[in-house]
Amino acid sequence: MALRYDFDMVAMAPTGLPDQFDDLAVTGIAAEKVAMFRDPATVAALKQADIAVQTYFTESGFALQQFDSGAPPGRFAMRDEDARIDVIDRLSANLEAHDLSAVNWGGFDFEAFMDALSVAEAVEDTLLAPPKPTPEYGIELANARAESQRNKGFRMMAMGGLSLGVILLIYVVGQMLT
């Protein structure tokens, strides 16, 4: 079966942030975007390739991980066009810096990748299917929301108790003055 060479640009968190800021979907913070292939078989092929090939791709802006934005084959999100151009420029510049002759590509077909890269077209972001949330993200978000609601309930009860206390205090002071 032929590998699919579509990739998405994925925002990565800056280093040095506290642990609670690792989830970019919640924080919206990102330092840079890296390219990730949509096809797990393509990622597996790169991981089987020689270290020189892996280094070439990682230094060009690829992460050896899989991610699928939901864009149709041969298409990519229009918002990622500038980031893709940066990756393509790094791929071109790094070809001269890396000796890739006589290396094992692990089933990765560089010519097919370049062909797919040259024919890929941008698509409006609104036409993309939303990425599927990971189960852990959904569970963590649900737990965070439940904890927030529970804390909100405690705060509301405390404010109600404080208000009632102030009203009673005013009533008692008013009764004493009359």
Image (cartoon, grey):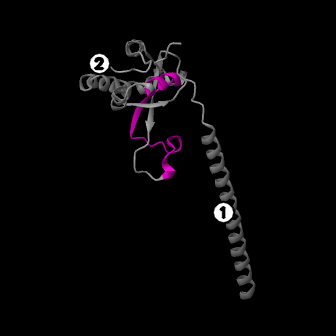
Q: Which residue is mark 2?
A: 101
In depth, the one of 15 and 56 nearer the eye is 56
Residue span colored magenta = 19-47
Q: CA distance from mark 2 to mark 1?
A: 66 Å
User: Residue 168, relative to residue 145: is it above or below?
Assistant: below
Q: x and y percent of residue 120 in the render?
A: 43, 15
Report the residue at 70% width, 78% height from top.
170
Residue type at the position of mark 1: Arg
User: Residue 12, relative to residue 131: is it above or below?
Assistant: below
Q: x and y percent of residue 116 in the render?
A: 42, 14
Q: Tell me if 106 is positioned left or right of 138 in this view.
A: left
- Residue at the left extreme, as displayed: 96
Give the secondary structure at mark 2.
loop
Q: Is residue 119 visible?
A: yes
Residue type at the position of mark 2: Ser
Residue depth check, mark 2 versus mark 1: number of the one nearer the observer: 2
Say few, some or many: other residues with alpha carbon within 10 Å of mark 1 (under 14 / 14 to 19 / 20 or more). few
Quarter of the picture holding the C terminus = bottom right
Give the secondary structure at mark 1.
helix
Earlier residue among tags 2 and 1: 2
Q: x and y percent of residue 135 in the render?
A: 63, 38
Q: Which residue is mark 1?
A: 155
In depth, the one of 100 and 111 nearer the eye is 100
Q: x and y percent of residue 15 in the render?
A: 40, 47
The quadrant holding residue 34 is top left
